[in-house]
Image (cartoon, rainbow, N blue to C red):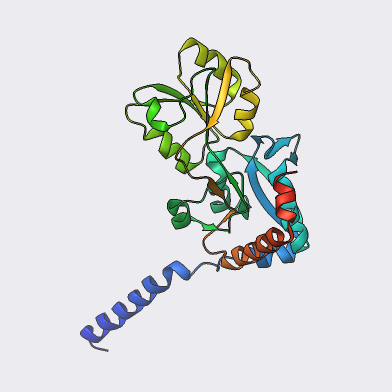
Amino acid sequence: MGLKKMRIAVGIVLLAVLATGCSSGEKRADSLELIQKNGVMSVAVPGNNSPYSAMSQGAASGTEVEFAKKLGEKLGVQVRFTGVEPSGLEQAVLDGSAQIALGRIAWSDGLKNRMAVSTAYDTGRLFVVTAKGNFSCTTGAFASAAVGASQMLSEPAGILVNGIDGVTVVRYDSPDTVEEDILSGKIQGYFCYENQAGELMKRASLQAQSVSGVLAEQYVVVMDQADENLKNQIDGMIGQMAESGELEELMNP
């Protein structure tokens, strides 16, 4: 073989290697097939977001935990739960720690671009807790103020609060000191969801209102983008449960 032909042949081989390099490893297993084969579905949930999900000594509880169990029941498999921080739900799916994740994960265009997302199974509203008599219930009312925000806020809610003109946002892992901080003037209000708002409203010095002009969030199950079969299966189950009224009973016991 001449030198020129040899160079061409080597070039073709190199191109072939480059073209197939990304697929030279094992093909990613289909999660639905694995779930059905192993009889177990792994689910990531926030470990401290009662009454929706909570983990204690390895046991999971909450309305969204019951929802995930019902999905497993309809698939004919067991459900194994992993408790993670809300910010780690997507990563738990991407790194293989879980096959699905849920936990008040709000639908957004950004989420849809990163993950496979199910049909909405529940909705929720953003609340703001203030001192009694302070009826501020729009985001604009807190311009140039310091406000608190629950670490449980979804991505869209976090963007909304952080986008208030001139705002200073204080993140709270727990609402335990919210009353003290509002009454001392450290923060003017605290943005959270119904579960925390309901508890804080029990304090005589506080009140809570849904944030005016903000649409209800649509909560979804998230999966790896490659898991279209699993997504379609879950969408079908959610649709059936919604039609039968079973979903309403699960999410609002």
- Direction from residue 46 to residue 190 in the image, left or right: left
Q: Residue furthest left?
A: 4
| Residue at the image point whose x is 44% and y is 40% from the top | 213
To which quarter of the image does residue 228 belong?
Answer: bottom right
162 or 204: nearer the viewer: 204
Quadrant of res 73: bottom right
* Percent x, y of residue 163: 36, 35
Residue at image x 66%, y 50%? 43
Residue 91 visible in the displayed image: no
Q: Nearer the viewer, residue 143 or 156?
A: 143
Q: Quadrant of the N terminus?
A: bottom left
Q: Looking at the picture, how far across and down is residue 83, in whole percent?
A: 65, 40
The C terminus lies in which quarter of the figure? Answer: top right
- Residue 57 lies left or right of residue 210; in this view the side is right
In the rendered image, residue 18, in percent from the top left (x then y), is placed at 37, 71
The location of residue 171, given as percent across then percent down, is 48, 27
Q: From this view, report whether residue 8 is shown above or below residue 205.
A: below
